[in-house]
Image (spheres, rainbow, N blue to C red):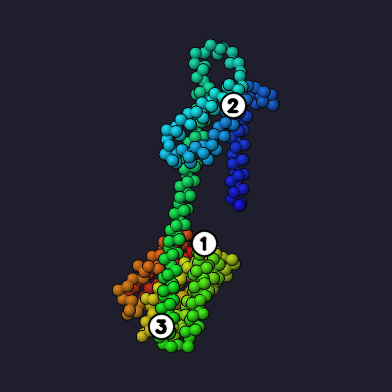
């Protein structure tokens, strides 16, 4: 709403400034307000008023309905008619005697047609370019929305599948912790299905989802997982795109945990002002040899989402050596 009011205010201010041009450049301005009665000033002022009207007609009507529809001939004809009207109408409606010595000038009939051609051309080009630029931005915004919807659609089944696998493992073991895992899964699915449909959620909810996921993994893996987990956030109402952090955590458990060997994981999430930092480290385990964390579906997905949602506002560094993966992610929220 504030953006709309600012746009209206800018348009009004710009229109006033444009109509002030013939006033401040009038050679009769020194006569106090007597210049308002001078026919030549009245013609100029009327011409500028018609140019201002043409600006909005071209922006809102001609370019969208003719130029964008590739009706170039009709567009050119309408422009010529508009220019003839702008050039001739003031002279027809406001007659004025020519200056002394110019009564019999042979080319005087052409002067009204040429006098404001440069102004008309500037207004035409400016209004057309502004409209074309706005349409390009709108197309980019729609593409961004479509891309994000596609990426988010990829996320939901991915999490659901892995979560069900965790509960399935518990059920096979006839673990008493199965019910607890179901409760955790219920909360996670509520977040994925309801909250993740929004463009942004509170950082608290994203962190809670990660904690539920970690807790479910802890229940499933028991003593084989050595987790160093630290969260130090002062959200202060910070918002984040949903499911932007969990793919890294999920990959750490998917590729860095083997129930048959020690599998240490370090996860730290902190905030400083509006800056969120996540540090994640896990060792490579035997089952993940030959698989690359950088190329996982979840990581490729989140790389794309980060580029779309936080362009120039994030720093993602993924390192891999012979026995360890590490992720450093910084986002300005």
Q: CA distance from mark 3 to mark 2?
A: 83 Å
Measured Cα–Cα span from mark 2 to mark 1: 51 Å
Answer whether residue 251 is visible to the viewer in this image: yes
- Circle nearer the N terminus (2, 1): 2
Task: Give the image location of residue 84, x and y in percent.
Answer: 51, 26
Local packing at callout 3 (Cα closer than 10 Å; few below 14, some 14-19, many 20+) is some
- The crowding category of the residue bearing disc 1, from other C-alpha atoms within 10 Å (few below 14, some 14 to 19, many at least 20), is some
198 is higher (above) or lower (below) than 263: above
Q: Position of residue 272 (x, y in %)?
A: 54, 67
**Residue shown at the point (61%, 40%) measured from the top left:** 12
> For residue 169, which numbered disc appears in the image?
3
Q: Residue 326: which quarter of the image?
A: bottom left
Q: Is residue 27 visible in the rendered structure shown here? A: no
Can you tell which of label 1 and label 3 is closer to the viewer? 3
User: Mark 3 falls on what kind of element?
Assistant: helix
Q: Which residue is mark 1?
A: 199
Q: Residues within 10 Å of mark 2 (few under 14, many from 20)?
A: many
Q: Does residue 64 sit above or below 89 in this rendering?
A: below
Of circles 3 and 2, which is in front? 3
Total residue callouts: 3
As measured in the structure, the alpha-carbon distance from the residue carrying label 1 to the one carrying label 3 is: 33 Å
User: On screen, 183 above or below 49?
Assistant: below
- The residue sitting at the left extreme is 290
Task: Check disc 2 and report the residue beneath it.
Answer: 44
Q: Nearer the viewer, mark 2 or mark 1?
A: 1
The residue under the point 41% across, 81% down is: 168
């Amino acid at each position: 709403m504030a953006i709309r009011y600012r746009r209206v205010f800018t348009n009004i201010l710009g229109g006033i400034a444009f109509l002030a041009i013939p006033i401040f450049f009038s050679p009769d301005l020194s006569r106090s307000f007597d210049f308002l009665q001078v026919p030549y000033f009245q013609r100029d002022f009327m011409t500028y008023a018609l140019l201002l009207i043409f600006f909005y007609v071209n922006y809102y009507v001609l370019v969208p309905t003719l130029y964008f529809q590739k009706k170039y001939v009709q567009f050119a004809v309408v422009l010529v008619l508009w220019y003839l009207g702008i050039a001739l109408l003031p002279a027809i409606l406001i007659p004025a005697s020519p200056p002394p010595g110019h009564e019999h000038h042979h080319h005087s009939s052409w002067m009204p047609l040429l006098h404001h051609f440069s102004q008309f051309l500037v207004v035409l080009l400016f209004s057309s370019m502004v409209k074309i630029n706005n349409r390009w931005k709108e197309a980019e915004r729609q593409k961004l929305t479509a891309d994000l919807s596609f990426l988010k659609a990829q996320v939901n089944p991915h999490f659901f599948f892995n979560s069900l696998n965790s509960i399935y493992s518990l059920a096979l073991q006839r673990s008493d912790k199965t019910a607890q895992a179901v409760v955790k899964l219920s909360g996670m699915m509520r977040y994925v299905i309801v909250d993740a449909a929004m463009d942004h959620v509170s950082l608290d909810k994203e962190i809670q989802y990660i904690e539920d996921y970690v807790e479910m993994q802890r229940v499933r893996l028991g003593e084989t997982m050595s987790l160093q987990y630290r969260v130090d956030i002062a959200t202060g109402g910070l918002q984040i795109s949903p499911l932007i952090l969990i793919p890294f955590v999920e990959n750490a458990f998917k590729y860095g945990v083997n129930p048959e060997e020690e599998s240490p994981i370090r996860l730290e999430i902190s905030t400083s002002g509006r800056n969120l930092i996540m540090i994640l480290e896990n060792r490579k385990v035997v089952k993940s040899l030959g698989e690359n964390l950088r190329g996982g579906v979840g990581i490729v997905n989140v790389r794309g989402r980060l580029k779309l949602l936080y362009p120039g506002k994030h720093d993602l560094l993924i390192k891999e050596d012979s026995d360890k993966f590490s992720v450093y992610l910084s986002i300005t929220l």
